[in-house]
Image (cartoon, rainbow, N blue to C red):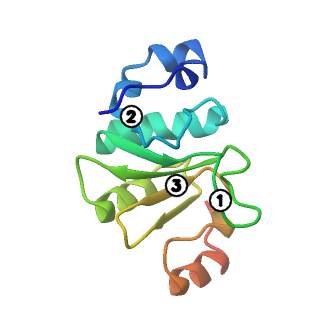
Amino acid sequence: MAALSAACWSVSPSFAADTHLAMISFQPQVKGLGCLKPEALGMIKELTAKIGPIQITSTCGGRHARNSQHYRGNAIDFRPLATSPRNAAAVAKKIESVGGVGSYSNGLVHVDVGDREIAWYGHKRSRRLAYAGRGR
């Protein structure tokens, strides 16, 4: 795993001291977890507890869709390191705090803490089902 940047340690003392932070690595373009909201940090803790280590490929920076949850500090894209992307997405969908889950053909998974009613699940057909009233 890559060394953790200083920015990720500035999120909060309780998150920085948490052992789940040891299960997170970052691609070079990711500046850390400092831009994420507490709800997103909690989601990451729960996710890594269930699926193991992840490599975060995107947080708040970069190019995303208009009105993306990334820009609000509510989303990450990641590569699961101890399980398959399909299994990681399935586990994420079962986590109460997760609003949206999507998977990409390159092995990345998107998770956010946005509303489930407008969440997407990686495929156009599934997106229609998510909009059709799947609530919490």
> Which residue is pictured at 32% across the width and 61% down the height?
85
**Label 2 Cα neighbours within 10 Å, binned few <14 / some 14-19 / many ≥20:** many
Q: Secondary structure at mark 2?
A: strand
Q: Nearer the viewer, residue 76 or 118?
A: 76
> Which residue is pictured at 38% across the width and 36% down the height?
25
**Label 1 Cα neighbours within 10 Å, binned few <14 / some 14-19 / many ≥20:** few
Q: Secondary structure at mark 1?
A: loop
Spot occupied by residue 3 in the image (x, y as percentages of width and height): 37, 26
User: Badges 3 and 2: C-beta atoms under 8 Å apart?
Assistant: no
Q: Which residue is mark 3?
A: 111
Disc nearer the start of the sequence (3/1): 1
Q: Which mark is residue 103?
A: none
Give the spatial CA distance, label 3 vs label 1.
16 Å
**Label 3 Cα neighbours within 10 Å, binned few <14 / some 14-19 / many ≥20:** many
Furthest toward the front, the residue is 28
Spot occupied by residue 135 in the image (x, y as percentages of width and height): 63, 65
Taking 127 as reference, is 23 above or below it?
Answer: above
Spot occupied by residue 100 in the image (x, y as percentages of width and height): 57, 61
Spot occupied by residue 6 in the image (x, y as percentages of width and height): 53, 20
Disc nearer the start of the sequence (3/2): 2
Q: Nearer the viewer, mark 3 or mark 2?
A: 2
Q: Nearer the viewer, residue 93 or 27?
A: 27
User: Badges 3 and 1: C-beta atoms under 8 Å apart?
Assistant: no
Q: Which residue is mark 1?
A: 63
Amino acid at circle 3: Val
Disc nearer the start of the sequence (2/1): 2
Q: Secondary structure at mark 3?
A: strand
Amino acid at circle 1: Arg
Furthest toward the left, the residue is 82
Q: Which residue is mark 2?
A: 24
Q: Nearer the viewer, residue 15 or 98?
A: 15
